[in-house]
Amino acid sequence: MASSSHSMSFPTFKLIKLCLIFIITSLIRTSSGQLSTKFYDEKCPKALTTIRKAVEDAVHKESRMGASLLRLHFHDCFVQGCDASVLLDDTTNFTGEKNSFPNANSLRGFEVIDNIKSKLERMCQGVVSCADILAVAARDAVVALGGQKWDVQLGRRDSTTASLADANSDLPAPFLDLSGLTTAFAKKNFTTQELVTLSGAHSIGLVRCIYFKTRIYNDSDIDSAYAEQMQEQCPFEGGDDNLSPLDSKSPFKFDNAFYNNLVQEKGLLHSDQQLFTNNGSGDTNSQVIRYSRSMGSFKKDFADAMFKMSMLTPLTGSDGEIRENYRVVNPPTPI
């Protein structure tokens, strides 16, 4: 009797091969990760409302905290991307970004992030990344002070590294001229127009005297009465840690007064006033004037630019980790 054939036909083999390719491709796509506004809908459904409530409480308690949380996110994303590297503390064998020139004795709001992280860890342990907390908290802080809401894509993971050198080189300094600012933002794929828009973050918050002392005593493109007023708060000698509002008109309201100040040569930082030149020939003058006349235009553009910034090279999929404590990298997993 003839034996039955167990050979596989070519069409069947080809079909199985195609199925395997599809499965492998799907796995790769899953591991690479995709950000989504619904990322925590099933894993931690109350995550966003928990963050928003904590931010609103913090801003209500201290209006300045809104600007501090926004700045934390900015200083995170401009160094290695939006990966919470800015939150890592120095250790005996690890150097973080907190003691870089732009961050030392300047960044604040860590206790608010601590509070949020502890709440979320009790609610859904090991699910919500510190990088996502920073991104959502910045958005909610702006909204709490009158800004426009934007969608935050979620699913970022936290870095296991930080870069002091990049923090010193990539974060725009307050003494930069327009060309330096343009270069710094272009390095992160932002246009000059987006530079002007994101600078509107200085509509809120306070700044230390050391960062604007040179401007109020040496710059020529500053309203003389305003310079004298600021010199009372920031003496020629000493007073480096004295605080003054970046926007003297409405320092705790997210509005377009910042741009009105620039038109009147009342920008407090040298880098801010660079966006508007008194001879009218600056490339950014027309945009500053437009924002000074249209708060709605500024707020919409700012929301769009912040969305773009929040997407700077996030870690997703199997890259990075979800830190148990935002200040330190997770301990090695026992084998």
Image: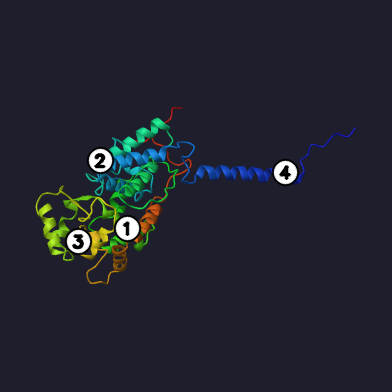
- Between the residue at mark 2 and the residue at mark 3, the CA separation in whole angstroms equals 29 Å
Q: Secondary structure at mark 2?
A: helix
Q: Which residue is mark 3?
A: 266
Looking at the rendered structure, the kind of residue marked 2 is Lys
Q: Nearer the viewer, mark 1 or mark 4?
A: 1
Proximity of marks 2 and 4: CB atoms separated by less than 8 Å: no
Mark 2 to mark 4: distance in Å? Answer: 67 Å
Per the model, the C-alpha gap separating discs 3 and 1 is: 23 Å
Helix, strand or loop for disc 3:
loop
Mark 2, other Cα within 10 Å: few <14 / some 14–19 / many ≥20 = few
Question: x, y percentage for residue 321?
Answer: 42, 38
Q: Residue furthest right?
A: 1
Q: Nearer the viewer, mark 2 or mark 3?
A: 2
Instruction: Specify the amino acid type for callout 3.
Output: Lys
Which dot, 3 or 1, sits closer to the camera? 3
Q: Is residue 37 left or right of residue 186?
A: right
Q: x, y percentage for residue 109?
A: 28, 41
Residue at screen point 32% across, 36% down = 114
Label 4: which residue? Answer: 13
Q: Earlier in the sequence, mark 2 or mark 4?
A: 4
Q: CA distance from mark 1 to mark 4?
A: 54 Å
Q: In the figure, is residue 34 to the left or right of 194?
A: right
- For residue 184, the mark is 1
Residue 13 screen position, x and y as percent: 72, 43
**Mark 2 highlights which residue?**
61
Q: Position of residue 105 (x, y in %)?
A: 22, 44
Residue 110, located in which quarter of the rendered image? top left
